[in-house]
Amino acid sequence: MKLHQLTLYEAHERLKKKDISSLELTEAVLDRIDALDGEIGAFITVDRASALAAARAADDRIASGSPAMAGLTGIPIAVKDLICTKGVRTTCASKILENFVPPYDAAVIEKMKAQDAVIVGKTNMDEFAMGSSTEYSAFKPVRNPWDLSRIPGGSSGGSAAAVAADMCIAALGSDTGGSIRQPASHCGVVGLKPTYGRVSRYGLVAFASSLDQIGPIAKDVRDCALLMNAIAGHDPRDSTSAPRETPDYTAALKDDLSGLRVGIPREYTEQEGLHSDVSKAVAAAVATIEALGAEAVTVSLPHTRYVVAAYYVIAPSEASSNLARYDGVRYGFRNASGTDLLAMYRNTRSEGFGPEVQRRIIIGAYCLSAGYYEAYYGKASQVRTRIREDFETALEACDVILSPVAPTPAFPIGEKVDDPLTMYLSDIFTLSANLAGIPGMSVPCGFSQEGLPIGLQIMGRHFDEKTLLRVAYGFQNATDFHTSKPKR
Ligand code: GLN
């Protein structure tokens, strides 16, 4: 086995035994990026010199034993390019932040650096995390390592593709409406969106603040738990961060699923546009989980048909407010060709933002404007409460809810890029977890007839990531989908 193919857990064990050094591991990963990323496009920035310096520092720590080695010490990790990294450009895949170099680290980066993790690079994404295919990156699209003519999913498409192609050992993404789970599903890797408030958003560039969460994208379920151990926890600098104890997520990794009830939402199985390869793979996954001792029950999420509409009012509204700060004065790009201040704002924002971001800003500004606020943002917020109640009721009858992640396997590049509504509709299964604030996860559960990965979504109660991980781990150990790799 080549070093870049190691899981986080395996790499940690081998570093601990001093079988390998972080320098060797990091070089293997960087060489892999050099070999493959020209065609995949997963990275926006790779800083070889600082990655190697971090690897040497990790090796020193391991050699001296002081401070003691931590879970991520010496592990090469890729970070989505909307998480602030001090001194390293953080672009959000947008022209408007093309040259933005943050003066501070995000909370999750501080935590990783405190463990001497190695940040190998910043990953490509849909501009400002708005999208489901990574085609809206202002720099280049990301290609799915399983089939280069397909999208990797989005918006954390770079992180998911990098993990799938072994161009990092694990990665961080962000999820506002599915952006960790959906690319994880399309790339055949594991992704977890934590409960809203579980991971600090300090230093995460805001898209829709009431929905955004940072989370892990990893090669398997155990790695996902290990990353959660490193990044979860209260942070007073994020007022929505929950002041709660962080459990040891690896304690949830048990094979036996007896006594658990898994809910199958009636509305999801009847969903229009659900690809038969996806419904078959998910049905087979449910059967496997039942065979492991869980009991399947039918549950109802009656407001499912309002989910896409509610999200696509709330998310753009919050985005229009959050993105008001990019005015050509305070950050990065400026077009100063106009004669007055207003012209400078207009020219900067027209040139600096891509078409999808502009569409969201226009929709959001409209939904928040005087006279329309109650009809749009106000109504969508009421619907959001109903959706949250649907989940609370359903999760009284079961411990987790199982569903598809995306209605189809990864679609061809170019297929939906000019049809925003169809792109939005493909988010039907993932948006609710963000609207309800609950955790959701994607684990590989099969392949389409064309050989593309399919993910199973597991959603659960607030702050109950452990049960998601338990179900995912039991399922993973009973199957071998996660061990299949793209051929390159
Ligand atoms: N696809 C959704 C959107 O375009 C979700 C994106 C995300 O989770 N960042 O808004």
Image: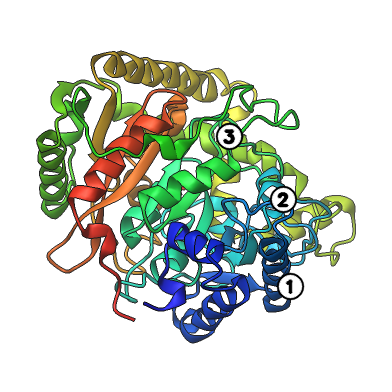
Numbered mark located on residue 114 in the image: 2
Q: Look at mark 3 in the image and give the residue it sits on.
A: 317
Q: Residue at x 64, y 74 (%)?
A: 46
| Quadrant in the rendering for residue 290 | top left
When the figure is inspected, residue 100 is found, relative to residue 1, above or below; the finding is: above
Numbered mark located on residue 53 in the image: 1
Q: Secondary structure at mark 1?
A: helix
Please state, as top left, top right, bottom left or bottom right, where the C terminus lies in the image. bottom left
Asked if disc 3 and disc 2 are in contact, CB closer than 8 Å, the reply is no
Q: Position of residue 60 (x, y in %)?
A: 72, 67
Q: Residue at x 59, y 59 (%)?
A: 79
Q: Earlier in the sequence, mark 3 or mark 2?
A: 2
Amino acid type indicated by mark 2: Ala
Callout 1 environment at 10 Å: few (<14), some (14 to 19), or many (20+)?
few
Q: Position of residue 172 (x, y in %)?
A: 54, 53
Amino acid type indicated by mark 3: Ser
Q: Residue at x 64, y 54 (%)?
A: 69
How far apart are the two marked residues, 2 and 1, measured between alpha carbons? Answer: 15 Å
Q: Is residue 95 visible?
A: yes
Callout 3 environment at 10 Å: few (<14), some (14 to 19), or many (20+)?
many
Please state, as top left, top right, bottom left or bottom right, where the N terminus lies in the image. bottom left
Numbered mark located on residue 166 in the image: none
Q: Residue at x 71, y 72 (%)?
A: 56
Q: Position of residue 226 (x, y in %)?
A: 49, 47
